Amino acid sequence: MNRPKLSPPQPSGTIEQLPMGPSTRSGHLIDVSSGMRTFRPVIDAEKCVNCLRCFLVCPDGTIDKSGDILEIDYDYCKGCGVCAKACKVEAITMIKEADA
Ligand code: SF4
Ligand code: SF4
């Protein structure tokens, strides 16, 4: 059988050793996925120290860092909360969609 070869697992190291890019490129999604969101992440620009952890870990590449402040594309953010968990200074709050 033509199976791909598995390589041994690599030690994870620290975040500084990881490639500094998002897991996926912003804009790769073609279907709006906001309908599945019950909570939305909101970035507090006053607290944000621009470490880009959220940008790095967002599984859908919905955080845009091209401007002066980070912006979340709410058309494609699914509200998973990974960015809020990753933020060390608690600059991202998950807010109920009904209250947003
Ligand atoms: S909630 Fe999930 S999909 Fe939305 S910006 Fe954060 S990490 Fe990305
Ligand atoms: S993880 Fe938090 S502090 Fe870092 S860039 Fe994102 S919002 Fe800002």
Image (tube, helix red, strand yellow):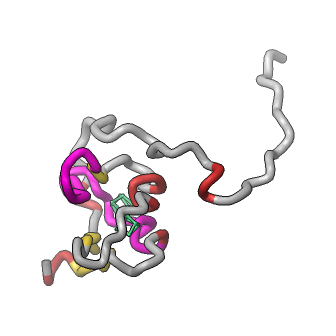
Residue 16 appears left or right of 92: right
Quarter assignment of residue 48: bottom left
Q: In the figure, 54 relative to 81: above or below?
A: above
Q: Give the residue drawn at x 82%, y 26%.
A: 5
Query: Which residue is nearer to you in this view: 30 or 1?
Result: 30
Magenta-drawn stretch contains 7: no
Q: Give the residue drawn at x 28%, y 61%.
A: 36
Question: Residue 33, position in %: x, y?
Answer: 26, 51
Q: Main secondary structure of the magenta part?
A: loop
Query: Which residue is nearer to you in this view: 39 or 90?
Result: 90
Quarter assignment of residue 16: bottom right
Q: Give the residue drawn at x 65%, y 50%.
A: 17
Query: Which residue is nearer to you in this view: 87 or 97?
Result: 87
Q: In the figure, 38 relative to 61: above or below?
A: below
The N terminus sits in image quarter: top right
Question: Residue 91, position in %: x, y?
Answer: 33, 77
What is the span of residues highlighted in magenta in the rendered image?
65-85
Ligand 1 sits in which quadrant? bottom left
Q: How many marks?
A: 0
Question: Residue 94, position in %: x, y?
Answer: 31, 78
Question: Residue 96, position in %: x, y?
Answer: 23, 80
